[in-house]
Image (spheres, helix red, strand yellow):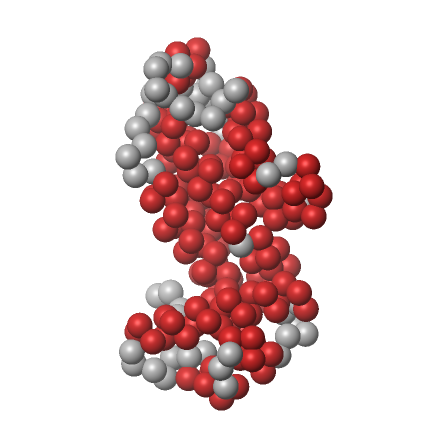
Amino acid sequence: MQPSVVSNVDDPALVEMRRSQFVRAAGELFARKGYHKTTIREITQGAGLSTGLIYSYVRSKEDVLFLVLENVLTSYLREIPRALEHVEGPVERFCATVRAYCRVIGDKPHATLLAYRETKSLNAEYQAVIKKMELETNQLIIDRIEECLAAGYFRPVNVELLSYRIVLLAHGWALKAWRLQEIVTLDEYIEEGLDLFLNALMTPAGWGACRQPERRTGTK
C-alpha cells in the first residue's frame, strides 16, 4: 500500500489548498537555502500562515519535501495527457509528449534540482513512491515511442533507454538553465532537442507521413 501524508483535517479541498501553499513556499526555500537549512517556521512564513497550522496538514519537514517532489511528478501525469488531446498521428503525439514534459520542467526548474539533490533525504517508503511515480511518468513517453515503432515510423531502439534520454533532455534545462537561458528560449531548446531525436530515429515511412499537408512535428 502506498504511504500517504497524514492530515488532521477532514476537508480534502482545504487540505489540498493549504498543502499547495506550503509546497509553493517550501519549493522556493529548499531551492534557495537547501532542504536541511530550511526551517518549518520559514516555510509557514513563506506561505503566509501561522507556524502551528502546518502540523494540521503534515507531520514533519520530510512530509513537505515529499509533497514538493510529488507535485512535480503529478504535473507530468496531468499535463502530458492534456497535451495529447486532439493530437493525431504517432510522431505528432511523441512530439507533443516531449514538449509537455519539457515545459513542466521549464515551469518548475527549482523542483527538478531539488529532486536531484534531496530525494535521498526521504525515508525508504517515500523514496519508493517517488521512484514508482517516475516510472509512471516515463511510461507516458514509452507509450508514444512504441506507437511510432508499431507504425514503422521509428527505427528499432532500446525503448526505455530512449525514454531516459528524453528525460535527461528535459532535466538538462533545469540543471544548466543559468547558461542555456542566455543562449536559447525554452521553446527553442525543446525544438532543437526534438530535431536531433527525430533525425536519429525516423524511418522513410515516418518522414513521409509527417510531410503530408498540415502535419506538424517541429522538425526543420
Task: Report the side of 118 relative to 141 (left or right).
Answer: right
In terms of depth relative to the viewer, which is nearer, 167 or 103? 103
**Residue at the extreme bottom of the image, as rendered:** 52
Residue 206 seen in render: yes
Measured as percent of width and height from the top left, residue 129 is found at 44, 60
Vertical side of 164 occupied by 202: above or below: above
- Residue 208 figure quarter: top left
Q: Is residue 180 above or below residue 68?
A: above
Classify 150 as above or below 5: above
Image quadrant assignment for residue 170:
top right
Residue 47 location in percent, x, y?
51, 75
Residue 217, percent from left and from top: 43, 25
In the image, residue 117 sits, relative to residue 203, either above or below, namely below
Rendered residue at 36%/51% (across/down): 78
Find residue 15 and report its image quarter. Answer: bottom left
Q: Is residue 176 left or right of residue 111?
A: right
Q: Nearer the viewer, residue 186 or 53?
A: 186
